[in-house]
Image: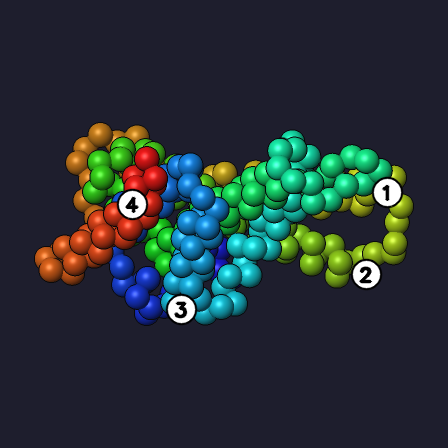
Amino acid sequence: MNLELYRQGTSFLHAFDARAKLLLLVPLIVCFFLPQPWEVLLAITAAIMAVIAAALGPRELLQPLKAIGPVLILICLLTPPFHRDGPVMLRVFGLALLTGDGLRETAVMLLRFLGITFGVFAMLRTLPLDDLVLGLRWFRLPYAACLVMIVTLRTIPSLAGTWRNVLDAHRLRGGTPAKQGRRKIVARYLPLLTSVLIEAVKSIPALAMALESRGFGRRNPRTAYAQLKKGGAFFRDMALCLLASAMLLWPAFVRW
């Protein structure tokens, strides 16, 4: 079972240096929070999706969309009523539900959320956690903070895998559950949540031993077996990173 978001591959995104990816992620996130027209945000988001599709395949775009689908629906439902300026585009019983300003703000919110999500997904999907830690350490991030990040990124998929295993086990023992009313939802899922909680508590000693084996809490200088890129490949990737960062931030500077 793959308990990490990282997917092995040989694409150009996989070959891109970890430090360049981390450095490029900062202006990428910043550009989505700058006051830019929705057309610019759409172009950047489309470019990110095109890069993911070219490097990993078009089907990889569905995974983040499934994860953030409910949030996107809430944005579409809750954003338009709070922006009533501009021409009315949808009116129900005399109440303006959708205006030009509301549609524009909804598009901006959706594109910001999608752009940041796809950007982070592209980095984590093509960056091993070991290289992520080495890259953060290269930027002088404390080892304790790096370890917390890597434990978090591995614990969340692990809990999701535990949930699937517990759900399959309960289905095998109890057969196909019959349809139940809303009042019995708690009674139906309480045994599942209890089993997942028990498995999580059982994993605490293993996590403690893993932290101890990685020297958590020690103050002596640390070493690493893995190494990041050096020489020409590193400078090439950093130059591409700086060029892409300038292209991302240039529309905002021109607007100002």
Marks 3/1: CA–CA distance: 44 Å
Residue tagged 2? 175
Marks 1, 2: nearer the viewer: 1
Mark 1: few, some, or many residues within 10 Å (few <14, many ≥20)? few
Marks 3/2: CA–CA distance: 43 Å
Which label was assigned to residue 182? 1
Q: Determine contact: label 3, label 1, CB under 8 Å.
A: no
Marks 1, 4: nearer the viewer: 4
Question: The disc labelled 4 sits on which kind of residue?
Answer: Trp
Residue tagged 3? 54
In the visual, does 163 lie left or right of 139? right
* Callout 1: SS: helix
* Callout 3: SS: helix
Question: The disc labelled 3 sits on which kind of residue?
Answer: Ala
Lower position in the chain sequence, tag 4 or tag 2 = 2
* Callout 2: SS: loop
Q: Residue at x 22, y 30 (%)?
A: 219
Lower position in the chain sequence, tag 3 or tag 4 = 3
Which label was assigned to residue 250? 4
Marks 1/4: CA–CA distance: 53 Å
Question: The disc labelled 2 sits on which kind of residue?
Answer: Gly
